[in-house]
Image: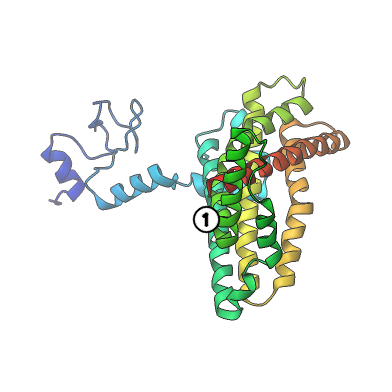
Amino acid sequence: MALPSRTEEDALDDGRTAPGDSGSTCANCGTSLAGRFCAACGQRADPPERLGAFLREWAEEAFGLDGRLARTLGLLFFAPGRLSADYLAGRRARYVGPVRLFLGTNLAVYVVAKASVALREIRELVYGDPSSSAPPKASHDAVAALGPPPADASPFEAALHRVAREHFERLLEDPGAFTDALLEVLPIVQIAMLPLAAAVVAAVWFGRRRGFLAHLLVTTHLQAGILAWLAAVAVIGEFLELVGRDATADALGTVIVVIGTPFYVGVGLHRVYGGSPLGSAVRTALVLGGWLALTCIGAIVAMVVGFFTM
């Protein structure tokens, strides 16, 4: 007589059959199980005290690492517009959600940018002269030229003048503080500008019988893809600089930004909205023009906020 397996013993101990067997029930809601998950509440049938089940559930909850992440990133990098098309067609469960994806790519860009700044500072200290990065005398003279506020200045103008002078002096003393503040503000500005970028897409593709949320979804996926490519190119660029291929790194970055971004956005928009190739190209140019204007506005806002919060 064959001895029962450990899984069968556990199930017999608490009065249930083994997970996945005919007649087993969900420990959470009592519904009969017919697979790895409960059809009523969605709980996994695996016993939670098992290390493998615990680690798998933790990874899925934290990162979506149940096959969705790899599938999502593959389409995000190499099939622009496919994620949006599948989402709009109702095929959503197989992919990472758009909000998590957009926040994740923003986080990736932030981490890569911070690491890039740190690596440059290390290279400057090891191979260069730290004194060469000191602000020029003309910068100190420009701050000194600000002088006290005018005698006829209002209290608000005087306070603004004083705050600006203090921050200019701090900028000269610690240029890295402005960079750190800017990197912290940029993701917030990027998220805040996302609905406006979607409004540009909605205006250009007006009359396509799609609600604003559909345009917002498409915009979220496309901008997440752009951010993912920028993060990947930045990592490759840092590696090329470490091996002394600075010119190659600069050329790669230029190609991705100048050629790759319009191509990526154009293919993605055409895949979702359809239309003739010429019509899609014209509409893509309009969308990119609107996004470029928003990017300039967002950069100015980020620099101003970063300057006064550093």
Residue 293 visible in the displayed image: yes
> Residue at left 55%, top 76%?
125
Q: What's the residue at 78%, 53% (across, down)?
A: 258
> Local crowd at mark 1 within 10 Å, few (<14), some, or many (≥20)?
few
User: Residue 213, how many percent across, how many down?
Assistant: 62, 25
Q: Residue furthest right?
A: 278
Q: Is residue 249 above or below residue 288?
A: below
195 is higher (above) or lower (below) than 138? above
Judge left or right: residue 69 versus residue 38.
right
- 267 or 178: nearer the eye? 178
| In front of the other: 198 or 10 | 198
Q: Is residue 299 left or right of residue 188?
A: right
Q: Nearer the viewer, residue 41 or 174?
A: 174
Residue type (three-letter) at the residue carrying disc 1:
Val
Q: Give percent across and percent down for residue 177.
A: 54, 56
Please name whichever residue, 213 or 5, is drawn nearer the observer in this view of the structure.
213
Q: Which residue is mark 1?
A: 111
42 with respect to 130 (left or right): left
Q: Please tell me which residue is depicted at 53% across the width and 42% down the height of the picture.
A: 103
- In which quarter of the view is residue 219 placed? top right
- Residue 183 in percent (x, y) is at 56, 51
Please give left or right for residue 37 compared with residue 1 in the image: right
Residue 293 percent coordinates (x, y)? 76, 38
Q: Name the outermost residue toward the front.
A: 151
Q: Total marks drawn?
A: 1
Q: Is residue 75 visible?
A: no
The colouring scheme, among rainbow, by chain, secondary structure or one colour, is rainbow
**Which quarter of the picture shows residue 216?**
top right
Helix, strand or loop under label 1: helix
